[in-house]
Image (cartoon, grey):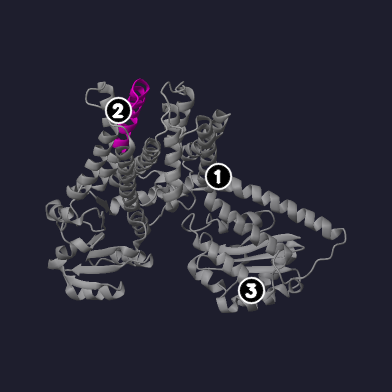
Amino acid sequence: MNVICLGINHQTASVELREKFAVADTDLIHAATQLVATDGIEEIVIVSTCNRVEFYAAAHQPEVGFSALNQFLADRAREHQYDEGVFYKYDSPQSIRHLFRVVSGMESMVIGETEILGQVKKAYGTASTAGSTSRHLNKLFQRAFNVAKEVRTKTNITRGSVSVGSTAVDLAEKIFGRLAHCNVMILGAGETAELTSKTLLSRGLKSIVVANRSFERAVELAKVVEGRAVPFEEWHTHFLEIDILIGSTAAPLPVVTREKIEPMMKQRKDRPLFVIDLAVPRDVDPAVNDLEGVYLYDIDSLQAIAKQSLDIRRKEVTVCEQMIERHVGDFINWLSNDSARLAAGASYLPPNRQSTPL
Amino acid sequence: MDRILLIFSTFCFFLGFAYTLFALGRGRYHPSLLNFSVMGVGFVFQTLFLYVRGRELGRCPLTNLFEVLIFMSWSLVLIYLLIGTSYRLSLLGVFTSPLVFTFQVFALLAQIDKPSTLKPSHNPWLSMHASISMVAYGAFALSCVAGLMYLVQAKQLKTHRLRPFFFDLPPIADLAVVINRLLLLGFVLLTLGLIAVGIGGSKPAPSENPLTLIKAAWPLGVWLLYAAILVAKKWRRLSPRYTAALAVAAFALALSTLWGLNFISEKVHF
């Protein structure tokens, strides 16, 4: 038995092409059932996300399997021209290696991202429900999930955050722990501030206060981030309540100065203050970082940390590849032994005869 | 026999320490059960050692510097296991194991395990004072560990130079709370220890050897040192960073004078 993979992803095809071949969630079971009934394909899992459309199949003869998949795609393309050259085709062991790399986030747009693992798990779950998987793909995908877990826990491939917003959120959690008791103030109503506060909100903030020169815009943003708007001139009256201050105004000079907040910091007891300055020109005087208990990060420092995390992740690629290679070898051995065992007389049960994953 | 138990215990702390050092050196440290497990096993061997030694002596094993160091290490691990629950899988255990390892290696190698020449005291109040005080020092030791972690993290946050293990450190606000609680716990225990000796210990006469008076004054000095930190924290609004730095400095001072106290103890007994 061979495992084959045919697909396109963000590296090989444009979004226009990817969307033509994407398989909608509602269509996955039908497509899988259709494919597994085709000659040459014994088992199938379809992974269809915004960045990739991939078909993993168990086939006795790879060429027959590829041809069945090509035919399926050509039928689906209908009026669109189907050019099979655009799709990559992997036979064992490349197909196995590719799947392990995909679930480990090594083929993702942002290296080390973990969302893909959930997406592949969902795809496998759907295929199982459709009855289109059996011993080979069950074994392969279970192994793939173990590989992803090992890679994530034993290397730094998922270390840190690689975007400004998530880096700021990570830092907030390193300062305050759980954010459930944290109050945030947004000065200004910039787009990055909105995105960052939404990310913070997703981690369970207590409250958000928005202060903007245009009060209408402040009210608008407050609605979006489930906060409340206050007049810009009164922002400092709310200073004692807040733990995180996000600067995002278009002011030409710093709005938050050391002289302004130093006396207020003395009233805050032990509570640290995390200041995220996303504005250019900067909203916060850099001297504020010298104050006891204040941690100031501007857009450059956040980007530098994000880049540092990305560099760490890139350096881990070789270690991850070695780890993956070991698992590819193990799986190929299992596949060979299994084929030999089947050839010796053990019967192969088609997908619809096996109800439990191995 | 009892030293073998101690060697096993020290080896456990060494394992945790060495693994972490290796992992941190490669920038690939991840919290795991390993540190907690080796600390747990090390603690069991420490407890067995103290039990065997206590049986041999017929009293609490605090008769020389060797036993004092081991008792303090045991207290440190005990406090960590009891109140460090939230941080069991964090670097708190990682920072604790090298300290305990250092104490025990020093105790094993420094030829300080000499039988006490002093007549054994069977005053239960004195035994209570000694043992409660040692647990208090365990809490102070752990506050020193947490203080170091706070300072390391505060420095990285301020300078924006984040090392890979930064992400495994407990949140800085949690560390500040832990330091305060440990200082308070140690202070309360030390106060209880002093009350115990105040109730049951014999008082040195003013005409006695000055060394006797120094020995009597030493625990009081440590008590005053920590009282000053707590008062400054409460009334002078000492910042968490300064509190952390003082937790480290105070324990270093208390530890360095412990040697002196032991020296005096060998000369003076009351």
Q: Using the numbered discs, state the Cα–Cα distance from disc 3 to disc 2 in whole angstroms.
A: 92 Å
Q: In this view, does A332 lie above or below A201?
A: above
Left or right: A341 with respect to A73?
Answer: right
- Identify the residue at horizontal 20%, vertical 45% (top origin): B232
Within 10 Å of disc 2 (Cα), the crowding (few <14, some 14-19, many 20+) is many
Magenta stretch: dominant secondary structure: helix
Q: Where does residue A223 sit, x and y in percent of width and height?
A: 28, 76
Left or right: B256 with respect to A249?
Answer: right
Q: Which mark is residue A74?
A: 3
For the N terminus of chain A, the quadrant is bottom right
Furthest-right residue in view? A345
In the foreground, B196 or B154: B196
Residue A231: quadrant of the picture: bottom left
Q: Where does residue A216 sit, x and y in percent of width and height?
A: 19, 76
Are both tags, 3 and 2, on one chain? no
In the foreground, B252 or A144: B252
Local secondary structure at mark 2 = helix
In the foreground, B237 or A9: B237
Q: Can you identify the residue that label 1 sits on?
A: A319
For the C terminus of chain A, the quadrant is bottom right
Are both tags, 1 and 3, on one chain? yes
Q: Using the numbered discs, state the Cα–Cα distance from disc 1 to disc 3 in whole angstroms.
A: 39 Å
**Which residue type carries mark 2?**
Lys
Q: What stretch is highlighted in magenta?
A: B248-270
Residue A265: quadrant of the picture: bottom left
Magenta stretch holds residue A16? no
| Chain letter of the residue carrying label 2 | B
Q: Residue B215 carries which label?
A: 2
Q: Nearer the viewer, mark 3 or mark 2?
A: 2
